[in-house]
Amino acid sequence: MTATTETGPVSTRTYTSLRAAWIPLAALCLAFFVEMVDNTLLSIALPTIGRDLGSGTTALQWVTSAYSLTFGGLLLTAGSMADRLGRRRVLLVGLAVFGVLSLAVVAVDSTGQLIALRAGLGVAAAAMAPITNSLVFRLFDDQALRMRAMTLMIVVGMSGFILGPLLGGTALAHVSWQWLLLINAPIALIAAIGVRFGVAPDRREDLTDDRLDLPGAVLSVLTIGLACYALTSGVEHGWLSAATLGSVLGAAVAGLAFVGHERRSKAPMLDLKIFSNGTVRGAALAQIGTSVAMAGVMFGLILHFQYAYGWSPVRAGLANLPLILTMIAATPLSEWLAKRFGHRVACLVGAACLTVALAGLAWGVDHGYAVIAACMVVMTIGLRTVMTICAIALVEAMPENRTSIGTALNDTAQEVGTSVGTAVVGTLIAALVTTQLPAGVWSSDLVQSFFHGERITYAVLAVIVGLIAAGGALTLTNSHATEEPA
């Protein structure tokens, strides 16, 4: 089936407005939404899962990190496969696998099985994320329409990431936590139908015959996985234990091997030469910083609201409303900053907001919800500004025929940041407070210990995120380009 424009059927698969492309655009947004919401949907249920399956802090950390790890580690591989096998075909396969695996949660009866299932869902999601974004570019020939559609996708994806706890908390008031994954199946089916009938098949001349870089994929996953495991192992086995030191050494060796392989390969998964471009390098770095902040804060506050405050999952989910509302309301401010001062200054302002918000949380975790909510607002302004501008800047800096790799790189940076942020917070809380979350109401001493652990954790995050996000922003250009959806 061919795509159509407002003037009738054509074979060029392009549309002349966002409204004319509403069916494929809605399907792609839905696919992107479900893969992003699944990043955080279970976060609100972590205490419930912990009690149900007898999980400790580090195990719960891996329920969240397993998805982000496989998702982030395989994004570039999925982008490479899509460029060779067909973008629409890979996306449809990813949606099918995502839906089927989501149904398998009914058979889960241990934390290990849930972690394995989450890792499998991350693999399927990796076949969806970069393709949904690159297919948006295929829907339009007009550059302004492409940028508007891209920004729409970014807003949808970020909203899904933040809405996860709210949707999950609301659902937990009525159903078991397993339903949080089961619901993925019908959503994936609807998205697949929209893609199948709204997006035209790939043309052979748009694909490449370069072979897949499977060694590069394996080495990238090993690097990220071993690095994240080293943090967990340090708490469980000691920082000088064989397991921890072996993980650190393994991550370093795998990382060096990845760099060496990519430089020698005739068809690398990631052409490292693109990082000679300051915009690409800086945008990817800044995206890592923002994702560290967002994932770390959301993981920490979920535990904070439900354990330290004793709130229900629904109330804890509603506590994230400042993030959601600010994500929408900050759009004009982010656009104005980029148009008025350019990408570099706008992202520096965003990085400053992230640092101030994290420092505010380090002080305010035991000063009540109002202070936490204010910090959430400031942090989200920073997130909205840096993430959107860096995504647009990164795609702008890529050659026209490499946009799928550009979007994959953008998503990979975000998922690496998500894995690191979750790992850092989970590790610090386990080291400073407790490795086993007790059931029932916490004692006042444990709550105070938790607040102390949070203060140190958010102070550490403020330094890490400030350096990474600001360092990335400094390499951006003074481009004022930003196209927001109508």
Image (cartoon, grey):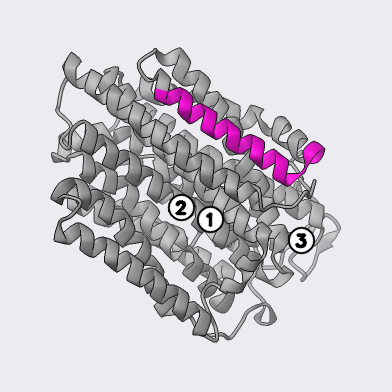
Q: Secondary structure at mark 2?
A: helix
Instruction: Specify the label residue 415 is tagged with.
Output: 2
Residue 477 percent across, percent down from the top left: 74, 52
From the viewer's side, name the closer residue of 240 and 305.
Answer: 240
Number of callouts in the render?
Answer: 3
Q: Residue furthest right?
A: 7
**In this rendering, is residue 410 above or below 187?**
below
Per the picture, the main secondary structure of the magenta-coloured stretch is: helix
The magenta region covers: 339-362
Residue 51 percent across, percent down from the top left: 16, 33
Residue at numbered disc 1: 411
Residue at numbered disc 3: 4
Instruction: Specify the label residue 351 is tagged with.
Output: none
The answer to the question of whether label 2 and label 1 lie on touching residues, with beta carbons closer than 8 A, is: yes
Q: Secondary structure at mark 1?
A: helix
Judge the density around disc 2: few (<14), some (14-19), many (≥20) Cα neighbours within 10 Å. many
